[in-house]
Amino acid sequence: MPRLLLLALAGCQSVQIGDDPVIDPVPTPPGCDSPANAPEGAFLEPGAPTSASLADCSAGLHAFAGAGTSTVSLSWSGPDATLQILDTNEAILQSDPVRDGDSVAFTLGWSGEHLVRVVPDAPDATDYALTATCTDGCDLLYTRYPLFFMHGMAGTDSFLDQLEYWYGVRGRLEPLGYAVYTGAVDPFQPSEVRAAQWAEQIDAIVATGQARRFNLIGHSQGGIDARYFVSVLDADHRAVSVTTISTPHRGTALLDIMGGLIDNPGITGLLVDQMFDAFIAIYDTENDQDILGQLDNLSADTMEAFNATVLDREDVYYASWAGKTCALLDVLCQIDNGGEIVTPMFGATQLGLALVEGENDGLVSIQSARWGEFLGTLPADHLDEVGLFPGTTAPGYDHLQFFENDAARLAALGY
């Protein structure tokens, strides 16, 4: 496999990891013998009153969301109580006594979910209503759950400390208000290994108290990693959505084509070992990777078995995008596809894949990229989809605008 083919699915920035959570005890309402621990109630939709009822000696708990640095006013209707604003690990951030008609202002320290606990001043059963309304910084954008980006094969924090995998995406989305996490896992491992490493990073974010669930966005093998994490490793249901971009859900015929060209396993292994040696300096990694296992992971036969056993979860929303690039002489395709022309490094693979699987982005066919709700085709090759080589995208494709639009799509869905 050529070096640029390995680079085609490369790495990204590190996840921000905070301290271990400090969780405050659930309070015991006055006149009660045990702590209040009512199930979590309805989400506080912005500006919409939410009514609820409490049994004797219980407290209410709700989630609300907003953009970091914005201010949310919590309006209270009900008997005397205390409103405790919490992080997602239920550590107290602010505590205010309230009477009927009072409002409590709170400036959000991060974008996404926060919690509010209602602790009545009396042990009796009660009805109440809460309204969460943004009062300042309301032009900022956010999703209820953070965007967690998962890179493809050959991932690293950055190439030579210069080239981001998700080029400029974090810099575009964070100033708009969105919570964005990127990370890096082993560049040359099967998805079972990589998914476990992603799980550690997700758990580390959960420990900060700034998120408890996530929108997973995977490019290429990163989408396979995401699906394995959700189906096999996500016992705590951390994922709410999985969006994949040119992920080979049904494998790629390129591996079969290349396997036919080199039918000697010893030679294949030797070539892969030599290519990996060339990457050690770039990735600052040890010679303990499993490229052959990773490539087999993405073959059509292996993915067929994967899809039969690694099943989608009913409580997770799955969606997908594909990429499409056009051959140099296919002018009609270029006109219909935003002026996209295959980059020379993908010229042969685009043609070979087109003969076997049809339209593709140079590495992954459209038919293989479809999973869950298919959202459409991007006029981009496999690198341009994430802006990996700045300035090379087609006139009809702006990868930063694409990711901004996709974040807004998830926000509109309530994720």
Image: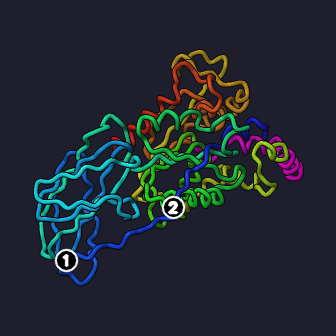
* Position in image of residue 383 (x %, y %): 63, 33
N-term-proximal mark, 1 vs 2? 1
The residue drawn where x is 78% and y is 45% is 259
Q: Which residue is mark 1?
A: 30
Horizontally, residue 41 falls left or right of residue 189, namely left
Q: What label does residue 364 carry, if any?
A: none
Count the marks: how many? 2
Instruction: State the image coordinates of residue 388 (x, y, percent, origin top left).
Output: 63, 33
Q: Is residue 288 visible?
A: yes
Spot occupied by residue 316 in the image (x, y as percentages of width and height): 42, 55
* Magenta segment: 247-275
Residue 379 vertical placement versus 311 (above, below): above
Residue highlighted by disc 2: 231
Q: Is residue 214 left or right of residue 33?
A: right
- Amino acid carrying label 1: it is Pro
Q: Mark 2: which secondary structure?
A: helix
Q: Quadrant of the N terminus?
A: top right
Q: CA distance from mark 1 to mark 2?
A: 43 Å
Pick whichever, 369 or 65, lies toward us.
65
| Residue 260 among those drawn in magenta | yes
- Residue sitting at x 45%, y 45%: 179
What crowding class fits label 1: few (fewer than 14 Cα within 10 Å), some (14-19), or many (20 or more)?
Answer: some
When the figure is inspected, residue 250 is found, relative to residue 52, above or below; the finding is above
The answer to if 225 sits in the magenta stretch is no
- The reply to whether residue 359 is in sight is no
| Direction bottom: furthest residue | 33
Q: Nearer the viewer, residue 280 or 300?
A: 280
Above or below, comparing residue 208 to residue 398 in the picture: below
Element under disc 1: loop
